[in-house]
Amino acid sequence: MLQLLGPSGSIIASYLIKAIGYLTLVGLAVFFYRLYQSRMLYRRVRDEHGIPMMPHSFLFGHLLVLAKVTMKYKIPRDGNGQWMFHHLQLEYPEIANKGIIYMDVWPVGYPMIAVYHPEMMAQFTQEHSLPKYWAMSQVEFKPFTGGEDLVTIDGPEWKIARTMFNPGFSVRNLLSLVPDMIEEVLVFREQFRKAASAGEVVKLEDCTTSVTVDVIGRAVLGTRLQTQVKENRLMATMRSQLKLIYLELNFGKLLNPMVPLKHWIYNRIIKNELVPYILNTAQNYEKIEGPKTIVALALKSYVEETRDYSARENIPADFIDRLVKHIKIFMFAGHDTTATTLAYIYYLLGKHPDKAAKLRAEHDEVLGPNVAAAADIIRADPTLLNKMPYSIAFLKETLRLFPPVGGSIRQSSPGHFLTHPKTGVRYPTYGFMIHSSVTTLLRDPDYWPDAGSFIPERFMVRDEKDPLYPFKNAWRPFEMGPRNCIGQELVSVEIRLILALTAREFEIEGAYPKDAPSWMGDQAYQVTDPEVGVATAHIKDRLPARIKFRQ
Ligand code: HEM
């Protein structure tokens, strides 16, 4: 080859080889410098502060520990990553029970600490809410929303946005949304009827995803997306884009030059789909009746300042761009986690007939025995949904055992420490991503008696001395503090409504094949779903299930 290029070709080739050699050397130098920095960060914590740590290798950090734990506890390849912290607690109780585990996974992940104690979680989420970890806005959500959405922004910008959207999630607004939700849930019930008549196995999380998308479409855009009955371009594009999100070391995504191009195309399609809703809401703002949608709330101050209707066709481009980003995060966060939670609820109803009987008895009591009349009864008086404490307890216990979000990740600042409330030991946090390991806490037997069992009744206990009475700050699947989930009341109303219109008519039976893998005693374990792309935990195989009519 070199001969073919001639003498000048061989000179170029030798320069090229040298350049590649130098670049490789520089790359290796940077790599080892970063490796040294990361490893020393942990060693300083251990040596200077006397903090106990899992066995730490200079070359591999804690990666060997994670490999050992993965093998010992047979963590499946698709098992959701949040469960690693639970298994680290099982393997190193003497460290985890002190409140914090330092975990060095560089270069696979960021330097991090996992916090296990509820009072220590409160220190950085409730007492003093630290900003979200930088990578959330700068890496993970960057291509999806530019890192400029309600989940990732911080400071005054976040406060303004949260104050703007809060009224959309007031109990009053949510109850006025119930008639719209009923329309969507009736379509869902129809799908269940068809599936029950056909007697086929369905992927239940597909059904719960469609209904929760259609409900959030009403709450955010004030429109019927009808994803339960046909393909919707907006949501299909959003799904394709979410699959590309970069979460962990993944060379396939990192080095693929098509990924940025695809993000660009998807962002354009999504914006084109959303702009008509925004313009339409702006132009008809005064005529809109019923619940306040997210789009209407965002436009409130703009339309109040722009009394000239024709000017409303020319909403400033940067305003539209910002609004599109918020809408995207609401459309995503508003269905993904609710859908999998609903699937788990049906799974647990099938698995615990005694608890299912209690839930149905509550429906009989509040809505009367005529199942066919339930939709009309709730439409006439949505406040009936507020009289279902057992349904709320059922939802809370489901979220305790199968939380879709593993906890929050926050950014520390110089000189920041977390203090153990009993021992008074101060743990340095600067340089680490701080993670509240909520999944672990929700199954921690120190806080939850009979932690692995499904006992909704623990959330009905009113006597603080009762051992089942939930420990302060320990139930936090929606996180706590000012950055808690804005949609939690919507989830609760939506799930109570869906159950009220389906639980008495249908029986759901998990239909995993007999030889399907099982983990932690359950075939329906929590996975990271490649079809979803982001790190939220989903039910294994989207819950294969048989829907049956009840006698
Ligand atoms: C079972 C369902 C849900 C669960 C378990 C859940 C969980 C959470 C958690 C743990 C956070 C805090 C995240 C963090 O600290 O980084 C959060 C924040 C958020 N959630 Fe949810 N969520 C659910 C449903 C919803 C729904 C239905 C919506 C939309 C209507 C929503 C919208 C949001 C938004 C916008 C934030 C950011 C709030 C802020 O920082 O001000 N979520 N959610």
Image: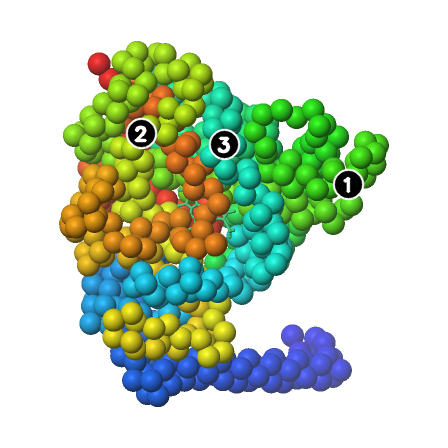
Q: Are marks 1 and 2 in contact (CB under 8 Å)?
A: no
**Amino acid under disc 1:** Glu
Q: CA distance from mark 1 to mark 3?
A: 26 Å
Q: Quadrant of residue 360?
A: top left
Does any portion of residue 434 appear in the rendered image? Answer: yes
**Amino acid under disc 3:** Arg
Q: Residue at x 58, y 54 (%)?
A: 159
Q: SS for tag 3?
A: helix
Q: Residue at x 25, y 54 (%)?
A: 471
Q: How many neighbours does mark 1 have within 10 angstroms: few (below 14), some (14-19), or many (20 or more)?
A: few
Left of 316 or right of it: where is 497? Answer: left
**What colour-coding does the image apply?**
rainbow
> Pointer 3: what residue?
172
Left of 279 or right of it: where is 502? Answer: left
Q: Are marks 1 and 3 in contact (CB under 8 Å)?
A: no
Place of residue 38 in the rendered image (x, y in percent of width and height, measured from the top left): 43, 79
Q: How many neighbours does mark 2 have within 10 angstroms: few (below 14), some (14-19), or many (20 or more)?
A: some
Q: SS for tag 2?
A: loop
Specify the label residue 486 is tagged with.
none
Q: Is mark 3 within 8 Å of ligand 1?
A: no
Specify the label residue 305 is tagged with.
1
Which of the two labelled residues, at mark 1 and mark 3, occupies the earlier sequence position?
3
Which of the two labelled residues, at mark 2 and mark 3, occupies the earlier sequence position?
3
Place of residue 90 in the rendered image (x, y in percent of width and height, measured from the top left): 20, 63
Which of the two labelled residues, at mark 1 and mark 2, occupies the earlier sequence position?
1
Q: CA distance from mark 1 to mark 2?
A: 42 Å
Q: SS for tag 1?
A: helix
Q: Nearer the viewer, mark 2 or mark 3?
A: 3
**Amino acid under disc 2:** Met
